[in-house]
Amino acid sequence: MRKVVLAYSGGLDTSVAVAWLRETLAVEVVTLTVDVGGGSLRDGVADRAISAGASRAYVVDARRRFVEDFCWPALQADAVYQGAYPLATALARPLIAQLLVEIAQREGADAVAHGCTGKGNDQVRFDVAVKALDPTLEVVAPMRVGMGLSRDEEIDYARERGIDVPVTHASPYSVDVNIWGRSIETGVLEDPWAAPPADVYQWTAPGHAPATPTEVTIGFEGGIPTSLDGSPVDPVALVERLNSVAGQHGVGRIDHVEDRLVGIKSREIYEAPAAVVLHAAHRALEGLTLSKEQLRFNRVIADELAQSTYDGLWFSALHRDLRGYVASAQRVVGGDVRVRLDHGTAAIVGRRSDASLYDRALATYDQGDLFDHASAVGFIAIFGLPLRTEAARQGSAWRWTKPLLAELPVEVTDGAQVPEPTTAS
Ligand code: ARG
């Protein structure tokens, strides 16, 4: 091994990893820092990489491609892991892995490296994605193969080598951030019974939530959000603005005990205001524009894509083809959704679409009803036929149904008696 491209956040771990790789493996280290938004890019990151001994430091602004090529497909698919986690961290990994591979190829490097530990999902996501894109590259994970230093040891290690140590307070948590969400774990959060302390949260209700609700209108085309309150907005600005306004209302907090790929349950806190609002709005629009068969079938695809995204299989053939199905099925998912943000909730209060399958003339209980009530009789006769056949051949459901009346308090009030039928004389 001669040259390694390291995924570099600019934090203490990866700064130490630059020096560790050079000294332990005697390799040249090139760093890659990817801006995936939400504050993932730290000030002075390139200088810090060079001070740690990197021969070259790349910084790539990938925010737009991250939103368009990773967050939007997940949104179109309604992909939410275990019904809770909008997958912020999991979605950024294949993008970062791809950039690692592209820079390794440009630099003629023979390996890539990342700062993941041997216990989480992220190591799997990086390793699997890199190998799917370029099987000739080796993957090194210093934290997994011997660079096990405590925080204090890391600080000493860095100071001894004149590495510019980032001036941050020792955070009690492990945090990963990008524009689609913040992921927070460890520390007191490891007790799933302990309520998250206030300092866990940075995006949601940082001050006091406004007393009055805010309503936003999100416009979609092909299942992708394209406008806010009637004006077209570019993808990055749209997510940033929703993070800000929904976050102020305390929307987007998620407290989740999730199943990691490596077999452990772990307690995670997420802040994902924009993702939570957009998923809710998108599902509301699908409810208006997709058939009930599509809606039901898409749940299966949503779960499959959420699981395989979580599991780091973004570059698998199945993932690719399911994304293709989703993109095609989304062609009618266009229109507007009104969302009311209020004290931690994002309530859908309205939706409309030119492709709406909702027909008021069919739905109404008022004047102008076009639904053919008389046809309902024939429809129900056919629809209920299997149950009548069951009852006829196998006995009525009464045979295995527990009586209600005998065990419930019953009040009986008598009224006028039905008059005797008068017989014509
Ligand atoms: N559990 C999440 C996932 O696997 C988030 C992990 C984020 N990492 C962190 N250091 N907090 O996608």
Image (cartoon, rainbow, N blue to C red):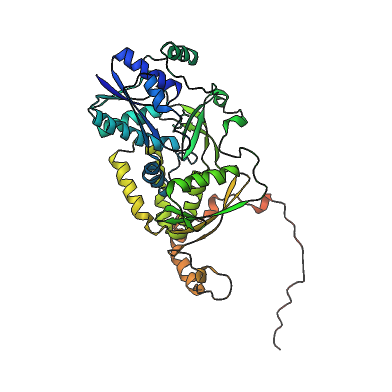
Look at the picture and state if 357 lies above or below 225.
Answer: below
Q: Is residue 67 visible?
A: yes
Image-based side of 33 in relation to 205, left or right: left
Which of the pair 135/319 is nearer the observer?
A: 135
Which of the pair 31/82 is nearer the observer?
A: 31
Q: Is residue 116 visible?
A: no
Look at the picture and state if 211 lies above or below 149.
Answer: below
Q: Position of residue 45 (x, y in %)?
A: 42, 27
Q: Position of residue 326 (x, y in %)?
A: 36, 50
Query: In which quarter of the view is residue 57 placed?
Result: top left
Image-based side of 193 in relation to 422, left or right: left
Which of the pair 275/67 is nearer the observer?
A: 67
Quarter of the picture holding the N terminus? top left
Which of the pair 380/344 is nearer the observer?
A: 344
Quarter of the picture holding the C terminus? bottom right
Look at the picture and state if 385 lies above or below 173.
Answer: below
Image-based side of 270 in relation to 111, left or right: right
Q: Position of residue 404 (x, y in %)?
A: 64, 52
Residue at the image position 63 percent from the left and 45 percent from the top:
343
